Image (cartoon, grey):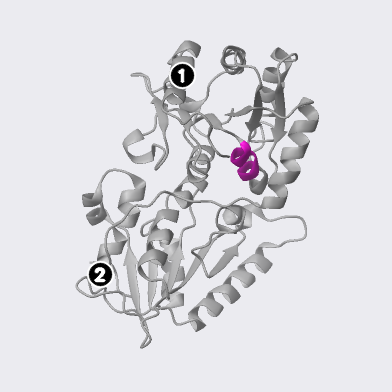
Amino acid sequence: MPPVFPGADVEDPGSRARGDATGRPRILVIRRDNIGDLVCTTPLLRALRAQLPGSFVVALLNRYNEPVLARHPDLDALVSYQKAKHREPGETVAGLYWQRLRTVIALRRQRFDWLLLPGGAQASVLRTARLVAPRRLLIRGDEDAVAGTHEVEQVCHLLPRMGLDFATPAPMVACDPQVRETLKADIAGRLGFVPRTLIGVHLSARKPSQRWSADRFAALIRQLHAPAGTAFVLLWAPGAESNRLHPGDDGKAAQVIERLRDAPIVPVATHRLEHLIAALALCDRIVCADGGAMHLAAALGKPIVCLFGDSDPNRWRPWGVPHELLQPASRDVADIMVEDVVQAHRRLCARLPANPVK
C-alpha cells in the first residue's frame, strides 16, 4: 500500500477514475528523471487522454526536459522547474527554491483528483506530492512489475490501478515545426543537395560501456554510404568531455568529421534539446546507443539500430518502432564490430516500407 498523505485518499482499484462531479478528473503526473524515463511515460499520457477524454492532465518535470512534452497533444498544461545545479547566469539557488515553492502552491490550488508518480517513490518527489495534497495518490512500485519487464509496461500499469484499462501505446514526442524546417534547409544547404535518405548517427552515451569509438563510427558511415542520395546527420552531446555537469563529445565528433571530409555528412551540435528532437525528426533511420536520444527517436517513430552495453534491453529497448538491437555477451559495445552494425542496418531496412514518410 502506498503512503497516504494528508489530503490524499487511498487508491480505489475497483472504481473508474471518477474525478469531480462532472466526470472530468484533474490529473497531475510528476516525472523528474532523465530524458528516456520521461519519454517512456508518454504512453501513459496517451492512454489517459484516450480513456478519459474530458480529463484535465498536467505534467510536472524539470526545465531541461521541457521540450520533450512541450507540444504533446494529450497534455492540458505543462509545469517545469529548474534544478539548482543547472541554474543559468543570473539565477540564484534561493530564487530557484522560492520559485519552486510558488509552483507547488499553485498546483495545490488546482485540487487534483489524482497525482501519479510513474518514476516511483523518490524522497524529493514524495515531498512535492505531500505539499500538492491530491485526493488520490498513485506511486509506481514493485506490484507494477506484473505488467511486464519494459519501463512502458510498468508505467502504464498505473492505469488499471486507477480502474482504467491497461494499454501501452507507442511513445510520442512532437518537435517544433519551425526549428525542424530551419534545420532541414540548413542541412540541404550544407550538403548542396536534398538527400533521398538521411541517416542520423548519434555518438554519445552516458555509460562508458555504451560508448563506441570514433574510428568505428567513421568506418560505419563509410560502409553505409553506398546508395546514391544517402547522407548523414552527425549528432552528439555538445561540450567538452571534462565538463562536470554536462560532459560532451566535441572531441569525438571532431575525430569522426576529420575522417569523413569527403563524405556527405552534416555535423549538428544540438546545444538545445528541441534541436536534437528536430534533427531526429528529419532522419529516416537512426544509429545510436541506448539512451535519451534512442527513446526520442522511438517517440518520433524512427527505425533504430541500437547498441546496448551494460543496460537491460528487456526494460529499455525502443518501444513501438522497428529496431535491431545489438548487445555483446561482454555487455560492452566496444565488442560490437562495424560489420555487425552494417548487417543489423540491412536487416532493419529489409523490414521497412520502400518509401517511408518522414
Please tell me whether mark 2 sits on a helix, a strand or a loop: loop
Q: Do the residues labelled 1 and 2 touch (CB within 8 Å)?
A: no
Q: Report crowding for label 2: few under 14, some 14 to 19, many 20 or more residues within 10 A (C-alpha).
A: some
The amino acid type, in three-letter code, at marker 2 is: Gly
The amino acid type, in three-letter code, at marker 1 is: Arg
Residue 315, x across and y down, in percent: 34, 40
Q: Report crowding for label 1: few under 14, some 14 to 19, many 20 or more residues within 10 A (C-alpha).
A: few
Residue 219, x across and y down, in percent: 59, 12
Identified at 64% across, 39% down, the residue is: 279
Identified at 79% across, 29% down, the residue is: 190
Q: What stretch is highlighted in magenta?
A: 276-282
Give the overall secondary structure of the magenta segment: helix
Identified at 39% across, 39% down, the residue is: 316
| Quadrant in the picture for residue 118 | bottom left
| Quadrant in the picture for residue 280 | top right
The answer to which of marks 1 and 2 sits earlier in the sequence is 2
- In the displayed structure, 275 sits above or below 141; it is above
Please tell me which residue lies in front, 280 or 259: 280
- In the displayed structure, 232 sits above or below 172; it is above
Left or right, 46 with reference to 138: right
Identified at 43% across, 78% down, the residue is: 112
Image quadrant where one finds the C terminus: top right
Q: Is residue 277 magenta?
A: yes
Q: Name the residue under label 1.
A: 346
Please tell me which residue lies in front, 143 or 241: 143
Rounded to the nearest whole Å, what is the CA distance between mark 1 and mark 2?
44 Å
Q: Mark 2 points at which residue?
A: 163
